[in-house]
Image (cartoon, rainbow, N blue to C red):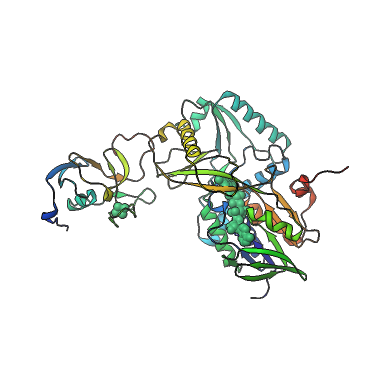
Amino acid sequence: MFRRFDEAAGPIVEIVVDDRRIEARLGENLAAALLAAEIEPFRTTPVSGAARMPYCMMGVCFDCLAIVDGVPNRQTCLETVRAGMVVERQNGARAPGPQNGGE
Amino acid sequence: MSEPDYMIVGGGIVGAAIAYGLARSGERVALLDEGDVAFRAARGNFGNVWVQGKGATCPAYADLTRGAANDWAEFAEDLSTETGIDLHFRRPGAAYICFSPEDLAKRVAVLEQSNANARIKSAFEALDLADLRQRLPDVGPEVAGGTFCPDDGTANPLLLLRALIKAAKDLGARYLPHHGVTSVARDGAGYAAETTAGVVRAGRLVLAAGLGNARLAPMVGLDGPVRPVRGQIMVTEKVRSFLACGTNFIRQTLEGGCIFGESVEEVGLDDGTSLPVLRDTAQKAVAAFPLLRDVRVVRAWGALRIMTPDGVPVYQASPDGSAFVVCVHSGVTLAPFHARGFVDNLISGSLPPDRFSAFSPERFHVQTV
Ligand SMILES: Cc1cc2nc3c(=O)[nH]c(=O)nc-3n(C[C@H](O)[C@H](O)[C@H](O)COP(=O)(O)OP(=O)(O)OC[C@H]3O[C@@H](n4cnc5c(N)ncnc54)[C@H](O)[C@@H]3O)c2cc1C
Ligand code: FES
């Protein structure tokens, strides 16, 4: 569904999404990289459990949340891709205590 | 519209509850409020329906609180049925958390005294850390224990306010925001208020203007002895449910956010926040529940309590029973009373001394022998 503009792309790096390795471009928008890898949905909501995907891509809707490098509720549309980044999809509310990786 | 029977000044939880109750009894009501710049405790409070220790030095206030808390479930159900708005009311009880054995002993003495004098009894348990952890397993090691009272509950105060205003409007009340009252006076047999949007007249007057009562009440021969006392509150991102009951300074909403804060500051009409208080508040929350350490705060705000000199409510009627003033700092807890029992008193035009003498502002007047 999404296509990268090759002229804007940085070097290829690997990131991990829920134990799956995907290729992304260094410095690109993380939400965009996840969309390009056809990750769907990004998360489910804490209250109703509804599935969510990025909506605004500019930091206001909070629909693009994920656990990024162990930190829950990160807005992936405000993160840039680094090599070796670990992303976990977040189902429902985060646990209150220290995170030991997803559920 | 013809002149209403009642004009209520102040569209916070108190004024809206009274408007709803009066409209439910068939009275024609106008509910006047200011704009968004106003000080509005109803929109910044904690949302506890709190019984434990309320009225420790004033049995009438303890009874008023306990009666209202006991009526909350039925009140919430009626209001939800009428409006379709769920108030998130629950009553799992709450723990008052103590950080030293001395605090716990003091707390127990306060609750025992308040029970001895009150007509409506309220059970409580004194818990050491191990017992408290039976109810709240995540309590941290710095906690000494606490008192648990099954009568405490919580509600979502914003949904409460919205439901009260909707219910009042559905029953025919006129809700008039952006009608800040600049002055109010007798006008023939009734009252006339000058507002920022013209004059409003009504047969009877109820002052429920929160901090505004201090200025408005004397215009009609009543007393509104209130001053602002600031509280700062924080709310976290949503987390999975871990608080099975409430506590005195942290509660978890149904959606999962943790609301905490119980600061008390005398800073006049300043409803801002300050870093030292927020830091202390966060540290105390983490001491009570260490698992909150890496949970992020998403919002913080200040709000001004409407405090009387002794912390006990003020209810007063004019001698002819045509004007009333209400000043309380537990508007959520007391909402069922304002919407029901109190409305009957308003309509009858008097506040019977057996119930209300403890709430008369005359208690603050210098006594002459
Ligand atoms: C930090 C904090 C925590 C609290 N926690 C709790 C709690 O857990 N449980 C609980 O029961 N209570 C709690 N309270 C108290 C509760 O919020 C108040 O008791 C309640 O909001 C009082 O309602 P009110 O309608 O009297 O006042 P307000 O909500 O202040 O409403 C007064 C209204 O009058 C309007 N007004 C003022 N002057 C005029 C004028 N001249 N003309 C027209 N309108 C005017 C204002 O715009 C305002 O909307 C808390 C309060 C604070 C500040
Ligand atoms: S997509 Fe809206 S905040 Fe990220």
State the residue in front, B20 or B131: B20
When the figure is inspected, residue B185 is found, relative to residue A44, above or below; the finding is below
* Quarter of the rendering occupied by the C terminus of chain B: top right
Q: Is residue B169 left or right of residue B295?
A: right
Q: Is residue B16 above or below residue B275?
A: below
Q: Position of residue B226 (x, y in %)?
A: 67, 49
Image quadrant in which you'd find residue B172: bottom right
Give the residue drawn at x 47%, y 35%.
Answer: B285
| Figure quadrant of residue B289 | top left
Residue A36 at least partly seen: yes
Work out whether residue B226 or residue B107 is closer to the camera in this orientation and state it.
Answer: B226
In this orientation, which residue lies closer to the viewer: A101 or B264? B264
Q: Residue furthest right?
A: B369
Is residue B72 something one can see in this rendering? no
In the picture provided, is B52 more to the left or to the right than B186? Answer: left
Question: Where residue A2 appears, x then y in whole percent?
Answer: 17, 57
Placement of the N terminus of chain B among the 4 image quadrants: bottom right
Please, is residue B121 above or below residue A9 in the view? Answer: above
Query: Measuring 12% from the left and 45% from the top, which residue is drawn there?
Result: A12
For this rendering, which residue is in front, B237 or B79?
B237
- Report the side of A38 relative to B60 (left or right): left
